[in-house]
Amino acid sequence: MDVMSEAILNKIEENYKATNTLSDDDYEMLYYTFGDMAGNALALLETSTIHKIETLPPSSYGLYKIESGSRKVYYVSRKCHICQCKFFKFKVKRDRAKQTCKHNVFCRMALILGEVGSPITIKLEDLAGYLNDIFSTTETLPVRRP
């Protein structure tokens, strides 16, 4: 996610903390920054669940588990702004056509709105499997040639 998008999300978070509501200006900033992806991310607030993954012993990876209404599960790294979804793999990582996916925007909006469910605790060793899946599948994609 680029610096401008991060700054806009920070501003939306600041506004929400002050008013406990999203204003029309906040929605406009979201749509201006993320386009249709903003609507898709906000729709996920109605149909999906998100949980922070905590580890024993504690770590600071910032990993979240998203389960969509269709029961698909995606892991998002909040600190690295990466996701397991195909859109992220192809449109963000391979083609560099988009800056992020709806799951990353959803994760951030869920954090802003306090919509994150209770944490899921796993062993630190198990975290390696999640991270390996995220990093290995996003880094080994073939480059599309024009």
Image: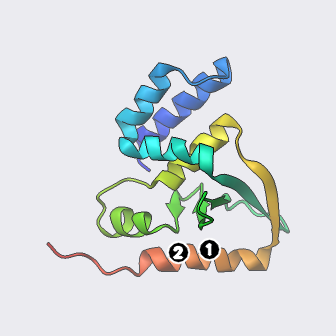
SS label for mark 1: helix
Residue 127 against residue 51 in the figure, above or below: below
> Pointer 1 and pointer 2: residues touching (CB < 8 Å)?
yes
Question: Residue 131 shows which numbered tag?
Answer: 1
Answer with the quarter of the image where residue 78 lies: bottom right
Above or below, 28 against 145 in this view is above
Q: Position of residue 10 (x, y in %)?
A: 55, 34
At a point 78% along the width and 74% down the height, the residue shown is: 124
The amino acid pointed to by label 1 is Leu
Residue positioned 45% across, 74% down in the render: 138
Left or right: residue 13 versus residue 32 is right
User: Residue 133 sits in which quadrant?
Assistant: bottom right
What residue is rendered at 56% in x and 48% in y?
44
Q: Secondary structure at mark 2?
A: helix
Amino acid carrying mark 2 in the image: Phe
- Residue 132 coordinates in the image, percent (x, y): 59, 79
Front in this rendered view, residue 96 or 84: 84
Location of residue 10 with respect to 19 vertically, above or below = below
The one of 129 and 80 positioned closer to us in this rendering: 129
The residue carrying mark 2 is: 135
Which scheme is used to colour this image of the protein? rainbow
Q: Locate residue 8, reporting x and y percent.
A: 47, 33
Please rate how many residues cluster around mark 2, counting C-alpha atoms within 10 Å: few if below 14, some from 14 to 19, many from 20. Answer: few
How many numbered discs sit on the rendered protein?
2
Q: Where does the image place residue 79, in percent across and percent down from the top left?
A: 59, 55
Horizontally, is 138 left or right of 116 in the view?
Answer: left
At 67% from the left and 57% from the top, the residue drawn is 62
Quarter assignment of residue 129: bottom right
